[in-house]
Image: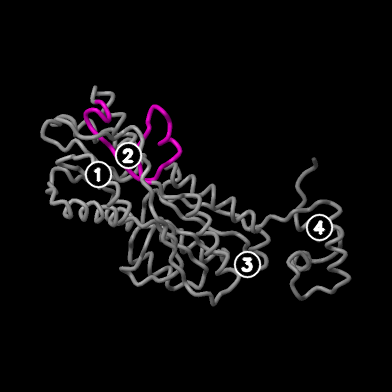
Amino acid sequence: MGKKITISEVATELGVSKSAVSRAMNNSPGVSEPVKNRILKYISEIGYRPNAIARGLSVGNMEVVALILSDIRNPFYADLAFFIQRKLSENGYMLVIFNSENNVKKEVEFIKHVIAANFAGLILLTARNQAISDELKSSNMPIVLVNRMLDAFDYQGDSVILDNFKAGYIATMHLIEYEFPRIAYIKGQNESSASIQRYEGYKQAMNNYKIPIQDENILETDLKMGTGYELAKEYIKNLDHRAKGIVIGNDLTAIGFIEGCRESGIKVPEDISVVSFDNISFASLYDIGLTTVDQHVEEMSEQAVRLMLKQLNDKNSKPERVILDPKLIIRKTTKRYSE
């Protein structure tokens, strides 16, 4: 296969301007029918496929959707990106991913860049932050929030979320039903609406069954695997006086925690029971067998793309909030409490 042909080379070969080639390919006015037909015939014969970003910049409307997420290394986010990209591609759109590394300043910068570059739309998994909300409200760009809410900052656009309160509740109830007298909770950062709501679900379940919530059993982390591993090493030092049932904010941290326990001779679930959230692909592996709350990542992705396409096709469409129902998947990391 020869070198890639550029739009400039197409224009030179046909003796027309680059803008004429762009207009012909995008069926835009400003080019006569004979010239348009000659351009389309030529690019069909040579198999020319324009670069979507370069073409979008030339006509002021990219057929590209941006996805801003916090950590692409997390399998949950990787799966979201995979399914969103696949569904967008089926509908003629490309996806560009921006990885913020859980940095709110980076997220704001990315949002500004996406708006300035005139992307077709933005799908966002973001923390709760006034600066982010202000950027979103000042834009007319189609925007969809995924698994996050910004209600506290009066953002009322399209969103698809898990019922995270219920997720926290059913995860905790699983350990309550297994008769754990004390239940610890390892939560994510307070900037995340998902983390906040899951913790609220935990507290509601504990209060409903009059189980004391003890400060020493509430821990906050960045929800990374390495942090879970290190946390386990500290937690088990005083295990006789700690809760033996633990709800952990996501699967990645739970897997790190379980590895830290096992490496130190603490058995899961015989010594400690662990339940978490996300149901990432690794969770079902035999050596892990993680009890977790399924977030329906594929359905979440499909709904996000549906909402995006709705806005792209109708600028006056009414905002929707899609709420998915969590499902507890019971595997090998939990068992009934025994002294």
- Magenta stretch: residue 167 in it? no
Quadrant where the image shows the C terminus: top left
Q: Position of residue 68 (x, y in %)?
A: 46, 55
State which tag comes first along the sequence, 2 or 1.
1
Which residue is labeled 2 in the image? 253
Which residue is labeled 1 in the image? 186
Amino acid under label 4? Answer: Val
Element type where label 4 sits in the image: helix
Query: How many angstroms separate mark 1 from mark 4 (CA)?
Result: 59 Å
Q: How many marks?
A: 4
Query: How many angstroms separate mark 2 from mark 1 (CA)?
Result: 9 Å
* Left or right of 98, for residue 287: left
Which class describes the residues within 10 Å of circle 1: few (<14), some (14-19), or many (20+)? many
Amino acid under label 3? Answer: Asn
State which tag comes first along the sequence, 3 or 2.
3
Residue range corresponding to the magenta coloring: 267-293
Which residue is labeled 3 in the image? 61
Element type where label 2 sits in the image: helix
Q: Position of residue 180 (x, y in %)?
A: 18, 39
Q: Quadrant of residue 182?
A: top left
User: Is 177 situated above or below 140?
Assistant: above
Label annotation for residue 28: none
Q: Quadrant of residue 43?
A: bottom right
Which class describes the residues within 10 Å of circle 2: few (<14), some (14-19), or many (20+)? many
- Magenta stretch: residue 276 in it? yes
Marks 2 & 1, CB-CB < 8 Å contact: yes
Q: Residue visible at 54% across and 64% down? A: 308
Which class describes the residues within 10 Å of circle 4: few (<14), some (14-19), or many (20+)? some
Amino acid under label 2? Answer: Thr
Marks 1 & 4, CB-CB < 8 Å contact: no
Which residue is labeled 4 in the image? 10
